[in-house]
Image (cartoon, rainbow, N blue to C red):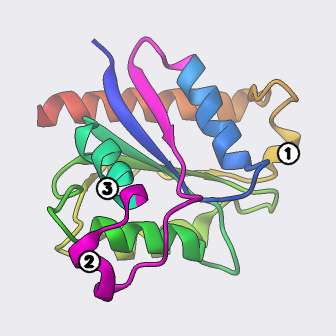
Amino acid sequence: MAIKVAAIIGSVREGSMNLRLVEFMKERYADRLDIEAVTINNIPLFNPDIEENVPQEVVEFRNKVKSADAVLFAVPEYNYSIPGSLKNAIDWLSRGGFVLREKPAFIVGSSMGVLGSVRAQIHLREVLSNPSLSPMLLPGNEVYIGSVHEKMNENNEITDSGTLGFLDQVVDNFVAFYNKMA
């Protein structure tokens, strides 16, 4: 049975390379991962003043993450860090029920730059280490897909054999990690 994965897309860009990457992963790994892309485009800014009456968009977002067996973060890099929209969505997840705590998770990231999303992923791991979040992150399997526009075709397929082989291995490692935790 496939692991139900909520893939949080860290970009609100219409042509997001990370959304395209998740769509590719959904197809390629459908036998092991049941991936649902979870966008953050309509999540209002976190504000403690409205926590008593949480906006419906936030309730739906939290429910998608909560009902999943695992979480995949697909993160781009903006100015050496994570996008503000992703940080905002994570802030909402840190309140109201600890929906990420001890949930198996892994991170992928791509960018048109050479380094992929190295710095963003470092910051994301730091943010996720907060005790109000603390998912169980797959250790030692950093996926930084640099120059992604040269490694993916118009059909959202990764065409670079080295990248594809590495991604296959990381997914295998995540499935083993998930099964070990279950």
Instruction: Report the mark closest to the observer, 1 or 2.
Output: 2
Seen in the picture, residue 85 relative to 9 is either above or below; the reply is: below
Classify mark 2: helix, strand or loop: helix
In the visual, does 129 lie left or right of 19? Answer: left
Residue 70: x and y in percent read: 29, 39
Earlier sequence position, callout 2 versus callout 3: 2
Classify mark 3: helix, strand or loop: helix
Report the disc number at residue 59: 3
Label 1: few (<14), some (14–19) or many (≥20) C-alpha neighbours in 10 Å: some
**Mark 1–mark 2 contact, CB under 8 Å?**
no
Q: Nearer the viewer, residue 103 or 173?
A: 103
Q: Nearer the viewer, residue 166 or 106?
A: 106
Residue depicted at 40% across the width and 26% down the height: 172
Report the disc number at residue 149: 1
The residues bearing labels 1 and 2 have C-alpha atoms spaced at a distance of 40 Å
Span colored in magenta: 28-57
Residue 101 visible from this viewpoint: yes
Q: Which residue is denoted by mark 2 in the rendering?
A: 51
Question: Which quarter of the image is occupied by the N terminus?
Answer: top left
Q: Amino acid at mark 1?
A: His
Instruction: Report the mark closest to the observer, 3 or 1.
Output: 3
Label 3: few (<14), some (14–19) or many (≥20) C-alpha neighbours in 10 Å: some
Residue depicted at 88% across the width and 29% down the height: 154
Q: Nearer the viewer, residue 115 or 39?
A: 39
Q: Amino acid at mark 3?
A: Val
